[in-house]
Image (cartoon, rainbow, N blue to C red):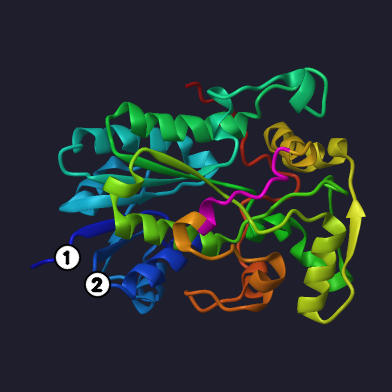
Amino acid sequence: MTAPIVLVTSASGRIGRELVALLAKQSEFTVRACSFSPTNTNMLRELGATEVVHFDLNDDTTWADALDGVTAVYSASLDPMLEGHLAFCKELGRRRDQIEHVVRVSCMGADTNTASYDATKHASRDGAGIPLMLQHYWWGEQALIDEGLNVTALRNNFFMNHLLKTDCDNIAAQGWFSNPLGDARNSFVATRDIAEAAAVILTEGPDRHGNKFYDITGPEPQTMAEIAADLGAAMGKEIEYRAQSMIDFEHDFGATRAEFFEYLSNGFYCRCSPDFYNITGHKPTSYADYLTTVGASGETGLDELWQGNLWKKGEDAMKDAAELKS
């Protein structure tokens, strides 16, 4: 009997690589990994992907081959790819009799559109509304739900691997990093934990996890000084955190990114959720362990720090996506 096919989108990304490696260790699925670039094919096969297919959210001619015979989908996309994701949701909806389960990567706080939000209590700046990036994450979930699909959303805290990427040159050459988070505590999450949760959920299936929404966080909330200490210990050198104003941060990365960091600054991401433990049966990965231990794809978090980064100083990566309407 042929194993059911799971389609892993964004398979060459941090979560995707871990997920491919984890699923490949099992026999429940044929793992079909999506790749935008053919340069990733060998890497994905070495991680254990059964098949590697070309896939582009902005090119619907690549979707049919990717979805042929698929019963489960791991759905992830970078924020600027939201419009392509919304279109792809409609294609999945047309195949709702075929697609039994969709596991969607989202963000903790995406539910603020349906939960209680009071700007006088929850915002760090007068008049601040729900950050646009969180609205986008909700749209990404809602589009799947509206198509009648069986959805599990992983609403993750801020990724550990994204935390310091914008300062990797300063860290390597000068031993310091900056951002506006200061003494705010956040339970940053390891991408390998998101992948592990996704692997368990896909394996156990929609009967157990369909129409569920899980908050995935780290095991403890940490300040930037504590993050600097963990990074310094992993690198064997002193690393300094230098506080940055929100005004300067917005100048560096744009208003959409800055308003999301306000959420990180005002306590919304401080709490530690039990959902990862309830899914996997063990505690989440700490930042110190993430940096120094090897994940399923063969890399430590410290290895990953020096790899590619969407967010670059002086560029607003969310400029086009900010114009998109729901």
Q: Residue 276 colored magenta?
A: yes
Residue shown at the point (78%, 56%) measured from the top left: 222
The amino acid type of the residue labelled 1 equals Ala
**Could you tell me which secondary element the residue under label 1 belongs to?**
loop
Tally the marks: 2
Residue shown at the point (69%, 45%) measured from the top left: 271
Q: Pointer 2 and pointer 1: residues touching (CB < 8 Å)?
A: yes
Residue shown at the point (39%, 70%) measured from the top left: 22
| Residue 177 seen anywhere in this rendered image of the structure | no
In the figure, is residue 291 to the left or right of 12?
Answer: right
Q: What residue did someone put label 2 on?
A: 27
Q: Which residues are magenta?
A: 268-277
Looking at the rendering, in which quadrant would you find the N terminus?
bottom left
What label does residue 3 carry, if any?
A: 1
Residue 217: image location, x then y, percent = 61, 52
- Pointer 2 local density, CA inside 10 Å: few below 14, some 14–19, many at least 20: few
Residue shown at the point (46%, 62%) measured from the top left: 280
